[in-house]
Image (cartoon, helix red, strand yellow):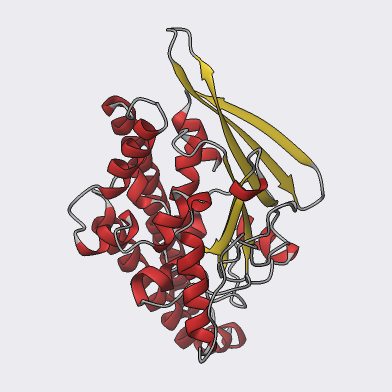
Amino acid sequence: MASPTPSGETADFLSAAPPCETGRKLNISNMIWEDGVKNFFSTYFATRRMWPIGYILGSPYSPLRAELEMPSKNWRDASEDLLALENGRDMIREDIRKAEDGHSGQRRFNLASFAIAKCNHDLIEDQKLEADREEAVKHKDHRIAQSITYDLPYVKSVSEGRIAYAGEVKAHYERYKDWTASRRRMRGRWIASLVDSGALPGWKWGMHNSIHGPVMAFNKRDSSPETEASIRFSELEMQRVFEEGQSHSFGCPALLPTRAIKALTTNTPTPKYPNLPNDPLQKFEPSKSSIAYQEGECDLVKKSDGSTGPSVKIRNVMVDGTTESKTFAQDPEGLFDET
């Protein structure tokens, strides 16, 4: 759920309160709570301090809305190029776009192939149970034969589920295989990639896992308190806002417990958390072991050819409290895998 954080305080994943916008007051007479929240966020997103993230989240002309109405157009890359030009940078080169698209596509293909191969392997193991039963009958081991016979209906049901899941994975891959790398990203993570490319100077991002999946936090620290800004939201909330027409709301879902983070890391099913974004390949994403949350910011540095380019600093905080820092310069594939 979206949560602005106040100016003059440290914007982190655990602090959230409405900002005090100097000189602006909301008329809340005869206003129900839902209308008041909607009015608050539309006002906050429209302020200069929230540009361009407020535009992306709240404008009816947002690229995240345009892509739903006209999905054949590449609204995300076009918006990134415009933001880069606004901030005195060159548009992203076509060869860089193609390299990232190819890397993202290959990654999704590998994940789909791995998921289907695992289903096939498990189906073969399921089928061995019938052979084991026949072998037990042949050797008149009635106790084992009876035990296997008792388990067979359940195993058959599981096998049918595996077949359905493999079909879902294949259909999902085919449906999105022609998408660009930027289009494949979840909405909040795509906004973070704008920070990484240098298209959003002054902004920083953070990401942690919650019971509703990934939560993204963005904050901007300028020399003047009047221009500081921050916002955080879950990816599930973004899905509901843009696809189901729901409004932004205050608060954020609870952090994912450490045991659940470790379960996701090891690809262990987590049935207690059914609200994770619906992506059948997500459980097979190779995750960085036990990362509690991740932060990123970008600086522009001079390259060997005299031009400037982004240098992205990533800080990973592990569930055991240790941290690691990495820097990515002119390495879009490495950055894509890290984040």
Residue 223: quadrant of the picture = top right
Q: Extreme top residue here?
A: 305
Q: Give the number of callouts.
A: 0
Res. 135 visible in picture? no
Instruction: Judge by depth and name the residue closer to the eye, 221 or 190.
Output: 221
* Residue depicted at 62% across the width and 59% down the height: 22
Q: Position of residue 74 (x, y in %)?
A: 24, 47
Evaluate whether residue 78 shows in this view.
yes
Q: Is residue 112 above or below residue 273?
A: above
Residue 24 placement (x, y as % from top left): 56, 65
Question: Is the residue 73 above or below the residue 261 in the image?
Answer: above
- Where is residue 133? Give x, y as percent: 49, 79
Where the N terminus falls, by quadrant?
Answer: bottom right
**Compared to 227, does 169 lie above or below?**
below
The residue depicted at 45 percent of the width and 30 percent of the height is 332
Residue at image x 43%, y 13%?
307
Give the image location of residue 191, x and y in percent: 46, 49
Tell which residue pokes out farthest to the right in this image. 321
Vertical arrangement, residue 180 with respect to residue 36, above or below: above
Write the residue at 31% across / 54% down: 63
Most foreground residue, 50 or 256: 50
Relative depth, front residue between 277 and 200: 200
Query: In this image, 43 relative to 69: left or right?
Result: right
Question: Which quarter of the rendering shows the C terminus?
Answer: top right
Residue 3 sits in quarter: bottom right
In depth, the one of 128 and 82 nearer the eye is: 82
Left or right relative to 90: residue 4: right
